[in-house]
């Protein structure tokens, strides 16, 4: 930190504060810069003044704070071009979806967006928004465009949001923004390559993932199958969320009524053995998520023709056990994906069964859910899971399957970072 102080004294930061609940953290960020000797000029978007007052920011920076574009008296003293000229680095924190959209498209209708367009200085943005706004294709496009333009990103993080939800979109902590800014300010100021900036938005870029989803159908004869009530929705949502985070995804799906998610390679199969073969063929991978409801048993032999009732009152079906695809992947000696996630769909003793499966199937994480008829999970849009890992048991609140998928992706990112 000592070197940071020496490195930052005399450097100037133009701190643009967007209108988000995280705006209060911009005050802490301003304090960190000041403590390390950097000068901070604060600019608030008009709406940001609803979240923090110009007065608090002025008190912490020790400088006049700017907000409106057209202030004749101010413009004659210090204009928007001057604001950018006097800075060594522009930091946007929090960067709202709106501000990112403006920046990506070159729109400017207030002082903050005008000086972001007028500046020729490096820009570091710390996005902060609701998880669905962050995941929206429009925001993804804007982030990609900004990254290509050379804008640097820090965060967002996964975590609890002010709106009561959980996911990717929380602003990075002030200390992390400060560190990222200090690196840019400290001499080695070459812009990070676009891919580097993109990694914040696409934390799984360069990773390969395989997801199984849906039921399997095990033929009894040419017209009858043993099936189950899995809709495939949770697995499809996970495949989509992994792809959105930048992973190259192969979705191995049993028979479902769902369309394949955008940007995901899909292999459609019917039986457990076909699913296993398709998974093996898709290896190697960094991530495996077994979300399929694989039939445990299959008829020992498939009748060549439709079985006839004849006069029989009873018929006996001999079943043989199917391969356990997840256990096969989780316990591989060679080429095991770094993160293996399984599901434990149970109707009783959720945690007990979940913990046992974590070990028996060699998983890093088991998502245990109650699929009893009353839960409405099979076929439904919502899910309530408990995440069981070596770290213990986390209770995830009931949420849509898309939200569970996003939360799982954030957890997978964490597990990958820790993986040897
Ligand atoms: O043992 P159980 O079927 O409850 O285990 C559920 C987990 O194991 C799920 O992740 C499921 O996809 C996976 N599984 C599998 N192959 C099987 C049975 C289950 O991959 N034959």
Image: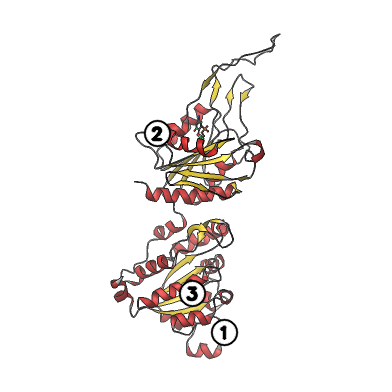
Q: Residues within 10 Å of mark 2 (few under 14, many from 20)?
A: some
Residue at 47%, 74% (x, y): give it.
Answer: 27
The answer to whether any part of residue 176 appears in the image is: yes
Mark 3 sits near ligand 1, with its Cβ under 8 Å away: no
The foreground one among 92 and 345 is 345
Furthest-top residue in this view:
311
Mark 2–mark 1 Cα distance, whole angstroms, equals 65 Å
Q: Which mark is residue 16?
A: 3
In the picture, which quadrant includes the N terminus? Answer: bottom left
The earlier-in-sequence mark between 1 and 3 is 3
Give SS at disc 3.
strand
Q: How many marks?
A: 3
In the image, residue 409 above or below residue 170:
above
Mark 3–mark 2 Cα distance, whole angstroms, equals 50 Å
Give SS at disc 1.
loop
In the image, residue 229 above or below residue 127:
above
Q: How is the image coloured?
A: secondary structure
């Amino acid at each position: 930190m000592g070197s940071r102080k020496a490195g930052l004294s005399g450097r100037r930061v133009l701190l643009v504060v967007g209108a988000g609940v995280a705006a209060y953290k911009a005050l802490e960020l301003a304090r960190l810069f000041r403590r390390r000797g950097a000068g901070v000029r604060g600019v608030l978007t008009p709406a940001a003044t609803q979240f923090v007052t110009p007065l608090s920011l002025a008190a912490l920076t020790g400088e006049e704070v700017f907000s409106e574009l057209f202030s004749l008296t101010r413009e004659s003293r210090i204009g928007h071009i001057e604001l950018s000229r006097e800075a060594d680095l522009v930091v946007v924190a929090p960067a709202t979806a709106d501000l990112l959209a403006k920046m990506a498209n070159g729109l400017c209708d207030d002082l903050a967006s005008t000086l972001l367009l007028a500046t020729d200085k490096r820009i570091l943005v710390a996005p902060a928004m609701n998880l669905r706004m962050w995941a929206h294709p429009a925001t993804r496009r804007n982030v990609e465009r900004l990254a290509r333009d050379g804008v640097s990103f820090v965060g967002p993080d996964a975590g609890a949001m002010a709106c009561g939800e959980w996911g990717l979109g929380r602003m990075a902590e002030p200390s992390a923004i400060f560190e990222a800014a200090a690196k840019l300010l400290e001499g080695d100021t070459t812009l990070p390559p676009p891919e580097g900036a993109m990694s914040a938005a696409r934390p799984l870029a360069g990773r390969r993932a395989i997801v199984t989803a849906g039921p399997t159908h095990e033929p009894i004869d040419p017209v009858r199958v043993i099936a189950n009530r899995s809709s495939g929705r949770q697995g499809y949502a996970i495949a989509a969320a992994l792809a959105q985070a930048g992973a190259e995804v192969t979705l191995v799906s049993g028979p479902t009524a769902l369309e394949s998610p955008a940007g995901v390679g899909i292999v459609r199969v019917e039986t457990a053995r076909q699913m296993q073969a398709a998974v093996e063929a898709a290896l190697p991978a960094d991530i495996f998520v077994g979300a399929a409801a694989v039939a445990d048993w299959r008829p020992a032999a498939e009748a060549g023709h439709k079985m006839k009732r004849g006069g029989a009152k009873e018929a006996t079906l001999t079943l043989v056990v199917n391969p356990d695809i997840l256990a096969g992947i989780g316990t591989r000696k060679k080429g095991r994906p770094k993160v293996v996630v399984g599901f434990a769909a149970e109707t009783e003793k959720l945690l007990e069964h979940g913990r046992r499966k974590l070990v028996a199937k060699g998983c890093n994480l088991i998502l245990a859910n109650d699929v009893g008829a009353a839960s409405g999970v099979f076929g439904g849009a919502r899910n309530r899971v408990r995440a069981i890992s070596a770290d213990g048991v986390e209770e995830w609140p009931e949420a849509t399957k898309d939200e569970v998928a996003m939360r799982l992706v954030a957890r997978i990112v964490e597990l990958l970072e820790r993986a040897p």
